[in-house]
Image (spheres, rainbow, N blue to C red):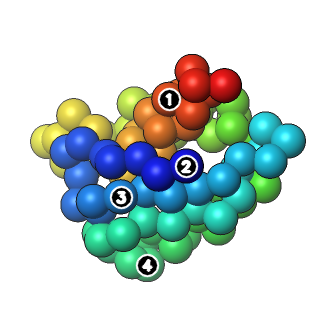
C-alpha cells in the first residue's frame, strides 16, 4: 500500500501487510535513520498493535508525527479490507 502522509516530512509511506503483520515499511523523504528504525521496530508486528502503540504520538508542536502517520495509514488499510 502507498499512503500520502499529512503534516510530516516524508512525502510517501509504503508497506505491505501479510497475515495482519506489517512488512516492508519504507518512507520517501524525512529522517532516514529514524524511519529505518521505525520500520525495523514494527517489522512483523501485528498491525493492530502497531496502531495501538503509535497512534497519537506528536512531533514537537505538530499534531502528528511519522509514527502517528504510519498508524493512520494502517487504519486506512484496515478500512479498505
Q: In the rendered structure, are the residues bearing label 2 and label 4 in contact, judged by CB atoms less than 8 Å apart? A: no
Q: In the rendered structure, are the residues bearing label 1 and label 4 in contact, judged by CB atoms less than 8 Å apart? A: no
Q: Please give the residue where the numbered disc 3 appears in the rendered image.
A: 12
Above-or-below relation of 79 to 23: above
Element type at mark 3? strand
Of marks 4 and 3, the one in the foreground: 3
Drawn side of residue 3 relative to residue 80, left or right: left
> How far apart, in angstroms, are the residues tagged by discs 4 and 3?
16 Å
Q: In the rendered structure, are the residues bearing label 3 and label 2 in contact, judged by CB atoms less than 8 Å apart? A: no
Q: Position of residue 44 (x, y in %)?
A: 78, 55
> How far apart, in angstroms, are the residues tagged by discs 3 and 2?
10 Å
The part of the image, by quadrant, that contains residue 51 is: top right
Q: Residue furthest left?
A: 61
Most foreground residue, 62 or 28: 28
Drawn side of residue 67 relative to residue 41, left or right: left
Q: In the rendered structure, are the residues bearing label 2 and label 1 in contact, judged by CB atoms less than 8 Å apart? A: yes
Element type at mark 4? helix
Q: Position of residue 6 (x, y in %)?
A: 24, 42
Of labels 1 and 4, earlier in sequence is 4
Q: Position of residue 15 (x, y in %)?
A: 58, 56
Check residue 1 in the rendering and tell me which mark sits there, or answer none.
Answer: 2
Amino acid at each position: 500500500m502507498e499512503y500520502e502522509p499529512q503534516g510530516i516530512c516524508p512525502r510517501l509511506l509504503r508497506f505491505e501487510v501479510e497475515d495482519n503483520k506489517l512488512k516492508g515499511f519504507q518512507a520517501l523523504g524525512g529522517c532516514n535513520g529514524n524511519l529505518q528504525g521505525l520500520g525495523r521496530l514494527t517489522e512483523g508486528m501485528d498491525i493492530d498493535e502497531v496502531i495501538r502503540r503509535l497512534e497519537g504520538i506528536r512531533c514537537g508542536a505538530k499534531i502528528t508525527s511519522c509514527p502517528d502517520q504510519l498508524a493512520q495509514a494502517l487504519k486506512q488499510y484496515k478500512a479498505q479490507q
